[in-house]
Amino acid sequence: QVQLVESGGGLVQAGGSLRLSCAASGGSFSIYRIGWFRQAPGKEREFLGCINWSGINTRYGDSVKGRFTISRDNAKNTVYLQMNSLKPEDTAVYYCAASTYYAGDDPSLYNYWGQGTQVTVSS
């Protein structure tokens, strides 16, 4: 079973930066793609971006394109979400998710999820 653990969340001022980590274990060799999502209270889960585990193949949601960057370190079984120019509306719980097959922006297509890490952006 794949297990995912997010870390790196916290409080940051608007305009600041934060890097989130997603560490995979328990079968990470089977991961095809890792996606990042976020969910604010009362809102649907929003796609942020995804990365192919085996190669450089990334794409991003329109709301964060140009500000967020996904990278990976396969030796550490870890994927990162670098967030720059943060805004108060970025405040949400951030999740990483893994799929063992091709998956894009639909959260229902991801097999495994982390517990999330809170990101709060203050003005």
Image (cartoon, rainbow, N blue to C red):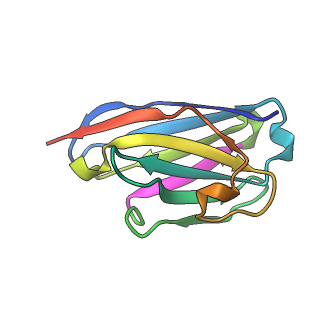
Relative to 106, is 83 above or below? above
- Circle count: 0
Q: Is residue 46 left or right of residue 55?
A: left
Q: Main secondary structure of the magenta part?
A: strand
Q: Tell me: residue 121, above or below residue 85.
A: above
Residue 69 sits inside the magenta stretch: yes
Q: Position of residue 36 (x, y in %)?
A: 55, 50
- Residue 4 in percent (x, y) is at 66, 33
**Residue lying farthest to the left in this orientation:** 123
In this view, the residue farthest toward the front is 42
Quarter of the N terminus within the rendering = top right
Residue at 26%, 52% in the rendered image: 89
In this view, the residue in front, 94 or 44, is 44
> Residue at left 36%, top 53%?
43
- For the point 70% across and 47% down, which residue is it? 98
Magenta segment = 67-73
Q: Is residue 38 left or right of residue 89?
A: right
Indicate the quadrant where residue 25 lies: top right
Could you say where residue 108 lies in the image, as x and y percent from the top left? 64, 56
Q: Is residue 39 magenta?
A: no
Name the side, left or right, on which 42 lies relative to 121: right
Residue 48 vertical placement versus 30 (above, below): below
Residue 112, by quadrant, is top right
Query: Which residue extends farthest bottom?
Result: 62
- Camera-nearest residue between 75 and 31: 31
Q: Quadrant of the C terminus?
A: top left
Reply above or below: 59 against 77. below
